[in-house]
Image: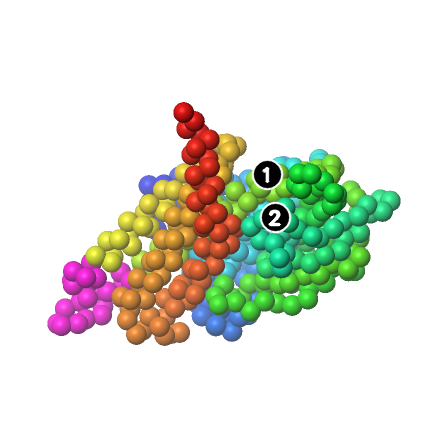
Amino acid sequence: MHTANAYDTEQEQLILDMLDRFLAVEVQPHVHKLEHDDIYPEEIVEKMKEMGLFGCLISPEYGGLGLSTVTYAKIIERMSAVWMSISGIINSHVIMAMTVQRNGTEEQKREFLPRFATGELRGGVGLTEPDCGTDLQAIRTVARRQGDKYVVNGAKMWITNSMYGNCLALLVKTDTQANPRHRGMSLLIAEKGKGFIVSKKLEKLGYKGIDTCALNFDDYEVDASRLIGGVEGKGLQQILNGLELGRINVAARGLGVAQAALSEALAYSQTRKTFGKPICEHQAIQLKLGEMATRTEASRLLVYSAAAAYDKGERCDAEAGMAKFFATEAGMENALEAMRIFGGYGYSKEYNVERLYRDAPLLLIGEGTNEMQRIIIAKQMIERNRV
């Protein structure tokens, strides 16, 4: 379990200590069965509601905890070190909530944010489609205005929190002829109702327990008052800021996985013996542990730095991209190295290492692939260093 360090303020530490107790008592003993049987952790989610975690970034004015993004990153880091899936239950929901808080009308904030904060309305973001992931401007889901309603038709894919949740920030085309395409994109606050169809739960390599689904919208009606910000054509810009937050979350997940893999490897290497001594005394294992520890600490610095930039309201797509790219690769590399240190036991379902190894690849893909992160970082570096 994560322990206090120099990065934690006293106030943060109280919150993080409470979280650590929750993770140790309510989550850790149940992870193995829930994850391997792919069971949705309903009781854990209810306790997360009681703790106010679904309102962690929502302003106290609207019933939330009003935590900093840095504290939020530390919460996600700790969650992911125990069970990465529950961090995803928070992430998509928080992106939806913060999109409304940053871009919604005052009426929308007062109607929805208190319900988001309690988890009464809980969900995520409906962006990706069967033929559209990284290139969001290629979405085909259309919302046509009819009187005081939008009528939505289309399909979404890989939507987290869509089976057990009840609300999405839904990205749609309100003008299919717009040029450039993003001017025809809008976001709707979409509660479940007639025509909002969860067509199937998707089976995954890892990241189990959490509901990730394919959706269809068949003449699904949304009140026009649910258009985020009240003006059409702003949807892509509104969600891109949310994706910066999502990338910080996924970076923090990578850090959590990297830390968990390091902790598992350190503990095991001190008890497992070969050739008459613990394997941690063999230089080959020490080389691995040294690299794992350095990757983990470098990831921590990048994640906290990106979160601090987001808190200042600065544009931080490069910082979030660096954190996401480096920390998720660190999670993947540390999970593989931990498996090698464990040897045959690392391949066994009895140990946490094989779960970390299955969970980590998602992080290289989700919230924008690491290939895309490198391009974003490079473009920002060029822009900031014009000669």
Question: Which of 305 and 56 lies nearest the eye of the viewer?
Answer: 305
Q: Position of residue 3 (x, y in %)?
A: 34, 51
Q: Is residue 362 left or right of residue 292?
A: right
Question: Which of 234 and 248 lies nearest the eye of the viewer?
Answer: 234
Label 2 – label 1 distance at C-alpha: 29 Å
Above/below status of 374 relative to 25? above
Q: Position of residue 143 (x, y in %)?
A: 76, 49
Dividing the picture into quadrants, the one containing residue 59 is: top right
* Residue at figure coordinates x 31%, y 50% from the top left: 295
Above/below status of 68 relative to 338? above
Q: Residues within 10 Å of mark 2 (few under 14, many from 20)?
A: some
> Is tag 2's residue or tag 1's residue first in the polypeptide sequence?
1
Q: Give the main secondary structure of the magenta stretch.
A: helix
Q: Amino acid at mark 2?
A: Leu
Magenta stretch?
264-286
Residue position for label 2: 136
Residue position for label 1: 59
View extreme (right): residue: 147
Q: Residues within 10 Å of mark 1 (few under 14, many from 20)?
A: some
- Circle 1 — which element? loop
Residue 193 can be seen, yes or no: no
* Residue at figure coordinates x 59%, y 67% from the top left: 202
* Quarter of the image where the N terminus is located: bottom left
